[in-house]
């Protein structure tokens, strides 16, 4: 059990403990790499002492994390992600996922990064996220109420009286479970609207491209080419 001190939860010891736990690296292994005693790592980990600049650099090098992460200046462990993490609050995992979407080859299909852009910028997407945040908040409150039954019993009369007043004023009152369900359903509905809006946008853009194409190409020649391609495909299917 760590001693009660003001430095135990400082950024460096906190991040060091996290890295040791996540990687499964022992204090002795880290001490051997840095060139110090195991007890020194234990003191750093508990916030009792701090490493000098040389040893600090060695710790960052061992775990392949930037200095800023160890100092608590950023949640990102990838230097290239600093700007997006600071501006948008995105985690390294989210940024890596978006980078994978951006880099995927999609042939004739719509690039996934384009779809993600359309979805995120649609107003219904923002609405869905807002409702989902409310759903998560209500879920936490619901758990707190469940675990604090004594508190609920003590204020039961006050809650019932307030509910009656609101209902008499024509204001609908939901219990916690109903409120959770409401926000979750609203989030699903809004996200569905965002998908529909993206589909409409894509169809409109593709229609414009097709119309522009046929303005510049002979329709009969294009139709004959398409029919020829279809005949070849049908012939392949008919082969034994």
Image (cartoon, grey):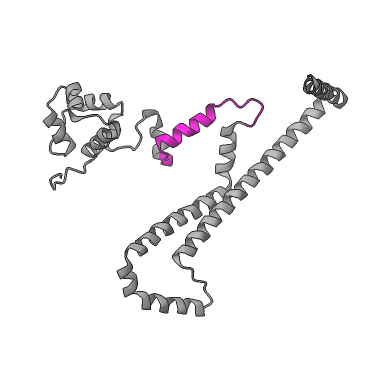
Residue 97 within the segment the image draws in magenta: yes
Tell whether 92 sits left or right of 8: right
Q: Residue furthest front?
A: 240
Residue 77's spot in the image, x, y percent? Answer: 34, 32
State the residue lying farthest toward the right.
220
Place of residue 170 in the rendered image (x, y in percent of width and height, measured from the top left): 54, 76
Q: Give left or right: position of 209 versus 157.
A: right
With 218 as the anchor, is 182 left or right in this view?
left
* Quadrant holding the N terminus: top left
The foreground one among 193 and 123 is: 193
Q: Nearer the viewer, residue 3 or 72?
A: 3
User: 218 or 128: nearer the eye?
Assistant: 128
Reply above or below: 149 against 52: below
All told, the count of numbered labels is: 0
**Magenta range:** 87-110
Q: Is residue 184 visible?
A: yes
Tell me the quarter of the picture where residue 13 sits: top left
| Residue 50 seen in render | no
Q: Kindly identify the residue that appears in the image at 41 percent across and 79 percent down.
A: 161
| Residue 87 pos. (x, y %) | 42, 40
* Residue 189 lies in the magenta stretch: no
Q: Is residue 78 above or below residue 151?
A: above
Residue drawn at (12%, 26%), measured in percent from left and top?
Answer: 37
State the image quarter where residue 55 is shown: top left
Task: Report the residue at 40% width, 32% height from top.
Answer: 81
- Position above or below: 64 against 131: above
Quadrant the C terminus occupies:
top right
Residue 150 spot, x, y in % from top left: 30, 70
């Amino acid at each position: 059990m760590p001693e009660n001190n003001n430095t135990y939860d400082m950024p460096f010891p906190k991040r060091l403990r996290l890295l040791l736990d996540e990687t499964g690296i022992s204090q002795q292994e880290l001490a051997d790499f840095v060139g110090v005693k195991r007890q020194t790592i234990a003191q750093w980990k508990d916030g009792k002492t701090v490493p000098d600049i040389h040893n600090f650099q060695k710790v960052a090098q061992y775990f392949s994390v930037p200095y800023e992460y160890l100092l608590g200046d950023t949640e990102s462990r990838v230097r290239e992600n600093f700007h997006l993490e600071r501006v948008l609050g995105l985690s390294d995992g989210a940024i890596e996922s978006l980078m994978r979407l951006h880099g995927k080859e999609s042939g004739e299909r719509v690039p996934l990064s384009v779809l993600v852009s359309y979805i995120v910028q649609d107003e219904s997407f923002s609405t869905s996220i807002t409702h989902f945040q409310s759903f998560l908040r209500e879920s936490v409150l619901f758990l707190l109420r469940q675990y604090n039954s004594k508190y609920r019993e003590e204020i039961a009369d006050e809650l019932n009286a307030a509910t009656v007043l609101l209902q008499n004023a024509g204001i609908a009152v939901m219990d916690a479970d109903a409120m959770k369900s409401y926000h979750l359903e609203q989030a699903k509905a809004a996200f569905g609207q965002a998908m529909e809006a993206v589909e409409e946008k894509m169809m409109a853009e593709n229609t414009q491209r097709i119309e522009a194409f046929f303005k510049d190409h002979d329709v009969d020649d294009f139709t004959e080419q398409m029919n020829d391609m279809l005949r070849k495909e049908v012939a392949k299917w008919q082969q034994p």
